Amino acid sequence: MNVQKMIAPHIAAVPPSGIRKYFDLINEMKDAISLGIGEPDFVTPYTIREAGVYSLEKGYTNYSSNAGFIELRQEICNYMERRFNLLYEPETEVLVTVGGSEAIDLAIRTLVSQGDEVIIPEPSFVAYKGCTLFAGAVPVPLRLKAENQFRLKREDLEKVVTDKTKILIMAYPNNPTGAIMEYDDYVEIVDFLKDREIMIISDELYAELTYSGKHVSIANFEKMKDRTIVVNGLSKAYAMTGWRIGYACGNRYIIEQMKKVHQYAIMCAPTTAQYAAIEALRNGDEEVAAMVNEYNQRRRLVVDGFRKIGLDCFEPLGAFYVFPDISKTGLSSDEFCERLLLEEKVLMVPGNAFGECGEGFVRATYATSTEKLIEAIKRTGKFISKFKK
Amino acid sequence: MDNEILHILSKNSRLTNEQIAVMLGKKEEEVTKAIKEMEEKNVILGYPALIDWEKTDNDIVSAYIEVKVTPQRDRGFDEVAERIYQFSQVKSCSLMSGSYDLFVVVEGKSMKDVALFVAEKLATIDSVLSTSTHFVLKKYKDKGVIFNKKHKDNREAVVL
């Protein structure tokens, strides 16, 4: 039997991520600095780790209810209200998932049928497209523009909406661009969407990492709340990536159906991590604020550093990424990243890894120590100077 | 802004004023002025590095010493504290609440060295009633920094 032929075509057709070669290159290098890592450099605050350890010591090792411990769902609701002014019912409108990623997959699978269209503003995190294809739906890229600071504009949305559009993905603060959407940006989008049968999946994992005012969710708009599935989680804000705790909040009928998929595929999110998450949401606000403050300092350092060495860099106001324009060097994103790594031992991720329209940009993470960032900027400056006329 | 500058410096005093200014979204002159003022007011007393001497070939023995003293009329504990902290062997000296009065950190080249200092210099001061010496055997954490734990970045090199 040719085993490869047994693989479903719509799975086999999805290409693997194109960044494998950078792994291989950097693994053979000494003193390389990776600005390619999309996760916090902080270790989970000790009080949260300790809560997980304590639950193990007590022998709390059973399943939780499919939707997650009710205490955790209650804490999530408290948190959503406290931080973002969003009200949800813990019994029916919250589902605890294995990271935000699972929530995205569940939401897409629960909503789309074969051939439905999912609008994905790009450059974007890679999972939306993959999950859409796995679900048999059609990803429709929407090209965000640097001159709009990668914010979503009504005119761009109008061009891609069809009668097959089922979902619009919103992902602000954004990976990879660091863009945010402010209240005023949403007004025209909400106005356009309010009479259309389109669901929103709003990936707000980076909500805490907003450096200009308070984070605004599209679900903050009365008309949108019911048709928005807000995806959030503890990975980025609480430096808890490996724990895998995310959640979805939304209309009870949709959450109910997502829970069904989750029940058969996953059972429940890992309970040790759920106990830790309860502690995080209850007592972690100060730790989060301290980390956000530190990211913000590094953000300013990196944006300033890149601009001084001659990279065009719009000011990112969220997440922990900068997304400089490297087209002036005359190199493609891929060439830029490969040469920067080989010649100066600094790793960034080519913008086209996040969609075709990311070509001409690179993503650099500042979730790395100040010392390393300073050194990386210095090395990148040396590299850039080779292309100055 | 002063507090933010102090927090940054307390973690890494090797950053330049320009870098600190960028990190805080301020002008370099503002930061330079603020630091100068804090130096003048003795808010910032110096910029020492935090060193794990055990990893070097310098032999350094530290002891924490509880000292009971008789306070002096009019000058309280200050006078005897001053007599103690002027010794270069004394690295730290604090007035404490509780069962003793002064907490003194002494460093020397050997246990004998420290013990002799206590016996000959410290215990013999007039107002000192008694001393109790505790030698440090191993330091795990100091000034918020965990010793012997090299920060290792275990993250994957690329995460999208």
Image: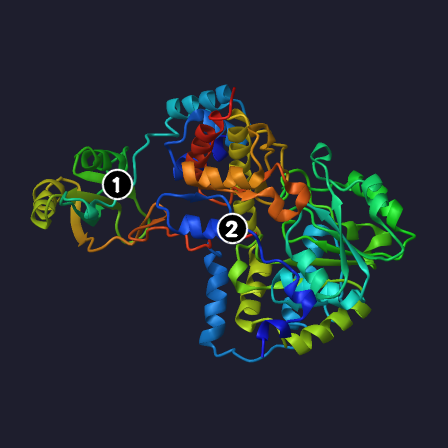
Query: What element does badge 1 sit on?
Result: strand
- The crowd level at tag 2 (other Cα within 10 Å; few <14, some 14-19, many 20+) is many
Amino acid type of the residue tagged 1 in the rendering: Cys
Left or right for A62, reference B32: right
The answer to which of B2 and B57 lies nearer the viewer is B57
Question: Residue A321: image x %, image y %?
Answer: 58, 42
| Residue A17 tag number | none
Q: Quadrant of residue A180?
A: top right
Q: Quadrant of the N terminus of chain A?
A: bottom right
User: Toward the viewer: A117 or B45?
Assistant: A117
- In which chain is the residue bearing label 1? B
What is the secondary structure assignment of the residue under circle 2?
A: loop
For disc 2, the marked residue is: A40
Q: Is residue A82 left or right of residue A116?
A: left
Residue occupying image coordinates x 37% and y 33% = B13
Counting labels gives: 2
Residue at the (64%, 72%) spot, across then down: A68
Q: CA distance from mark 1 to mark 2?
A: 39 Å
- Judge by depth and name the residue closer to the eye, A106 or A55: A106
Q: Amino acid at mark 2?
A: Pro
